[in-house]
Structures are given as C-alpha cells and as structure tokens.
Image (cartoon, coloured by chain):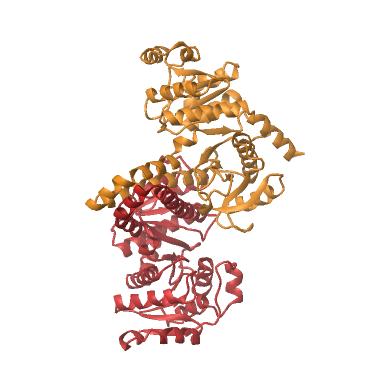
Chain colours: A red, B orange
Amino acid sequence: MRIALDAMGGDRGSGLIIQGALSALRNNTDFEIILLGPEDFLESQLSEQALDSSLSDRLHIEHAPETIRMHESPVEAVRRKKDSTIMVGFDLVRNGHADAVVSAGNSGATMASAVRKLGRLKGISRPGIASMFPTLKNPVMIMDLGANVDCRPQHLVQFAIMASSCTGKVLGIPKPRVGLLSIGEEAGKGNSLVKEAHDLLSNTSLNFIGNVEGRDVYQGDIDVIVCDGFVGNISLKVSEGLAEAAMKMLKSEIEKSFRAKLGYLLIRKAFANFRKRVDYAEYGGAPLLGINGVGIVSHGKSNATAIKNAIEVASVMIRNRVNSEILEALEDYAS
Amino acid sequence: MRIALDAMGGDRGSGLIIQGALSALRNNTDFEIILLGPEDFLESQLSEQALDSSLSDRLHIEHAPETIRMHESPVEAVRRKKDSTIMVGFDLVRNGHADAVVSAGNSGATMASAVRKLGRLKGISRPGIASMFPTLKNPVMIMDLGANVDCRPQHLVQFAIMASSCTGKVLGIPKPRVGLLSIGEEAGKGNSLVKEAHDLLSNTSLNFIGNVEGRDVYQGDIDVIVCDGFVGNISLKVSEGLAEAAMKMLKSEIEKSFRAKLGYLLIRKAFANFRKRVDYAEYGGAPLLGINGVGIVSHGKSNATAIKNAIEVASVMIRNRVNSEILEALEDYAS
C-alpha cells in the first residue's frame, strides 16, 4: 500500500509534514509513503533527518516542481499547474503507483484534481468532503463541507450513502445513525431542499433518524450528518471561530486577576486535555468521498499529528475498501 | 409608551417573566407594561409581590386565556387561538393601546401573529428575525435567524437594510458595517443566492464590506451579518450546542483531578465573568424586523434579566423610531 503525501501543502511548512509522515511510518508498517514536491528540496530535507533504512526504504520522493497555493482558484490552478504536487499525486493513483493522496493544501484544488484524474464513482453525481467532528460522545461525520454549495435533494442522499458506508467501515459502526441537518426535528421543517431530501432519505435502507438541529451536532447521538456544502462549511467555520473567540475571552478574564492566574496553573492540564479532545488534529483528515480512488484533505493548519492521522485515515479507507462498500450501497439503493 | 409582555411564553414559567417586568419598570420610568395572560392567574401572581403604587400603577393586565405552546405549528396556532397571549398583544398594538409586544414563547407564532395583525412595512416582502450576538469586540446583529428558510437575493438586501437601520438607531453606530455570510471572502464565492445578493448589495448605499466567513462572526469587526433564515438558524443553534458541549467537556476534565478542582475554585469568578459576557440574556431580545410595529422575541430559556433586556430593546426601538428609519432607507434604495 502506497500513500502519496503532498509535502508542500498547508500553512506550516514541509518540515511538519515530513515529521507527520515519519510518525505514520513508525506507527504502521503496512504502507509506504511517497512525498510529493521538488526533488532537490525534499532530498535535502530528508538528508537532515539521518533516517535508518527501516524508514528510508519505505519513504520515496516523486518530483513535483509546482505548488497550488491556498488562495488560487481550484479549477484554474488544476488546469494550469499540471506538475503540481496534487496533480502529480493523483497521476500516481491513476497509473497504479499509489493508492491514495493526502494533502493539507488547497482542498478545492485537491477535489478538482481528483475528479479530473480519477473521475467519479459510478452513480455519484457530486463528490464531496466529509469530516469527523468531536462531540460529547462518539465523533460525527459531517458531509458536505464545502465542495457543493448548491445541491439538489438527490445529492444529499448520495452524501448520506457515502458517509454512512465510510463511517461504517472506518469506525466499525454496524448501522450508522444518519441525520439531516435542519431547523426543526419534524419532517416538515426546513428549506425546500431539506424537505425533499427528507422524503428521499426515508425511502432508503439507511438508518435514517430524520432531521437533526444545529444544537444536536456536538451531542454525540448521531454518526452521520448530511447537509449542502454551503451550510456545512459555515457550520464548520462558525464552530472554529466560536471556539477560538471563547478561549480568547476566557483567557482575558483569567488575566484580570492574580487569583485566577494562580487557578489557571492548577487547571492547566485539564485545559490541555480538553483541547486535545476537541483538536481537529486528533480526527485526522477529511475524506473526499465519491471519487474513484482515495483522497484525503487535511486542515491548512495541520501539525505533524494531524498529518499522521490523515495518512492513517487514508490507509484505513484503502484497507477496508470503502469505495467498494459505497458502490454496493448505491446499487442497493438504485435497485 | 406601553409594552405588552407575554406572561405565559417561555420554558421557565411566568414567575421569572413577571420579575423581568418589575426589573424593567424599576430601571426605566418612561414606559408602562401590560402583562398578557389569564386575568385571575396573573392577578394572583401579582398579589404575592406586594408592589408599591409607583410600580403597580405602571403594570397592567390584559386578559388572554389561551397560550400557544412551543411545539405548535405557528400558522395553525395563530388561526385557531384568537385569544392567545400573542394574538391579544398584537391586537393591542393594532388598536393603539400598546406600542410593542415582547414574547419568550413560540417565535414563529409571534412572527405569524405580528404579520397577521399589523402587516408588513411598505416595501418589505419578508419580515425576519434579527438578533445580537456577543463577539470579541462589539456585538453583531445577524438576520435572518429562521423566519425565512428559502430566500431570494432581494430578501437578503431587505434584511441588510433593516438590520443596518436597526443597529444604527439602537446602538448609535453611524454607518454599520454590513457583511454577507458566505464560504469565502471573494465576491465570486458562495452559493447562487449569495452570489446574486452580493451584486445587489454592492449597489446599495449601505456600508457593505462584502462576503464574510463563519469564522468572522465572533471576531467583532462586523456590525450586521445577513444570511437566509436556514443558515442563520443553524449557525445560531450550532453555536449554542458547541458552547454547551465545550463547557461540559471542560467540566468533566476538571472533575478528573483534585488539583484541577482546586484550581477551578480560584478561577470560578473569571468563568462567571466569561459566561456573563457570552450570555444571550445580556443581549436582550431579537427584534422582528419588517413588521408594521414593534415585536421582540426572547429566548425560550429567558431568565428575568433576558426579559428585562428584551423589554428595554423594545423601548429603544419605539423611542428611536426604527421603523421610520427603515422606511426612509428603503425609499433611498428604491429611488
């Protein structure tokens, strides 16, 4: 099993990405990693690491001189930068030299590149981005997170089938509970997209539990939540922004008194555990579901742990043949 | 100035609502309050308070034997329960016996009742719910929060005009910064609704700062954020759910060690200040903008402070003639 890793993606430099790769290789012996980036640059980076052969034998470099930046328009960048890390990575998958691509770079470009090089899974009109979120209990997979901003009801059904197959296989949940994000629990509540999707989802063999509300997302009683990519992306960004703002406000309150600062010293470890519990890095990457292959996008701010976990998500998806599961589920639904 | 208050709305009983009313009367001397509810019940509630005449002279009762419950369908409930607190309240406004209605009950029914009894402001096709949110700096007004789940671009422009007039008048901000909630800052980013609304908003005289993202909501650099009611409601509920879940997770981490529990005792006041800073109760009620009168909905979990603040928002809106301001702004836009 070979996983191609975009060594140039993300906001924090390739040093952390290579660290993540090494950490994944040490942790698991059943895959190899192909680093994507300018050959000379990556060779000099690796030479600094003084790796022993048990690792270096499983770590390869594929020359990709170009990088697609975060702010670039995905469609245009993919057309123009044929030798970019992401494009070269999906070329490797297409030619059978790799089994997956992992990138912390431009997620829209990663999706566009995957669709261009590998195509869609049969029966899927809109591939999307799915991701795990921490909750009070088990993590929940939300799809779509931004690849499809205008959806038809049928697309939400496809998201539900794909995310349900993925969580079922990856987390080993037998019948994942699937909820439809809306503004009220009753079937009639929501916008016209959601009302129609509710009817369609009720007629699948999925474990569809009906509408769920925004306040249910972090409760942990749902395994999969589907929504259009506009709503999913805003929910994700609002959550990130709120968490960050709340920590800043709390910190500024603590800094107002000596007593509270002292208390913080005692409580610091609990805070660190809390942060670890809600840290995106612990939840690995976000699978691109619906492409004819495996692609994982990782947060632009990914640290080494996040990269390691994203690589592991890729390996679990390959090993458990998530795409075969999706194709079977789609056939069941169509028949 | 007379403000009609739904004494039967909300999840926490009329005791707290009456406390909120008394607190508002003590705090401000320029308005009177009309309690809406079953006369006998409210009289017995008030008789327990032993009010002196300076308060009791400014506190009236209007008999409204029926109550619309939280789970009832707004349109149906409003049609069926003609003697409900909310309907009686807006009747008072229509007949000139009150200047505003405040309710912590069913917000959909409050909106439906307001539209039925008072009608829409001239030029407004879709009234909506606006509310203030705490941020790192100044509060931001978000509209719509759930009254309109399927919107056309023109509706978002009307929300922007109304919320801008309201924050301008209520908070005294000369040129409120108006943002359009989307999934990227560039003009071309977003779903088709947002892309069209962006073009329309660029051609108004509003201080339109362009698209804003979910992560900007709590930063405090925007005065007004517009979105359709589906997205607004989900953003609100996701935020509430995340805040609640995060506090629970943090608490469970603190409870794992004696040291952290001790630390919590020292830090408790900072936590309390933080909670107060983000407490919805401090931000008062959510104005129904676009109706031909003043209506304020308050959170179902409102405590006495939240009710008091909602009453004060109503009084500020009446005093500052927010609706006249909106009508003028609409005329400017149309001309």
- In this image, A286 relative to B202: left or right? left
Whole-percent x, y for residue A297 in the image: 45, 67
Q: Is any part of residue B243 visible from this angle?
A: yes
Residue situated in front as seen by the camera: A145 or A51: A51
Residue situated in front as seen by the camera: B42 or B173: B173
Whole-percent x, y for residue B30 in the image: 56, 20
Residue that appears at 64% across and 28% down = B321
- In this image, B290 relative to A196: left or right? right
Q: Is any part of residue A210 visible from this angle?
A: no
Dividing the picture into quadrants, the one containing residue A29 is bottom left
Whole-percent x, y for residue B77 in the image: 46, 26
The furthest residue to the right: B335
Q: In which quarter of the image is the N terminus of chain B?
A: top right
Dividing the picture into quadrants, the one containing residue A308 is bottom left
On screen, A36 above or below B25?
A: below
Whole-percent x, y for residue B166 in the image: 61, 35
On screen, B76 above or below A54?
A: above
Residue situated in front as seen by the camera: B117 or B95: B95
Residue that appears at 73% across and 35% down = B331
Q: How many marks?
A: 0
Q: Quadrant of the C terminus of chain B?
A: top right
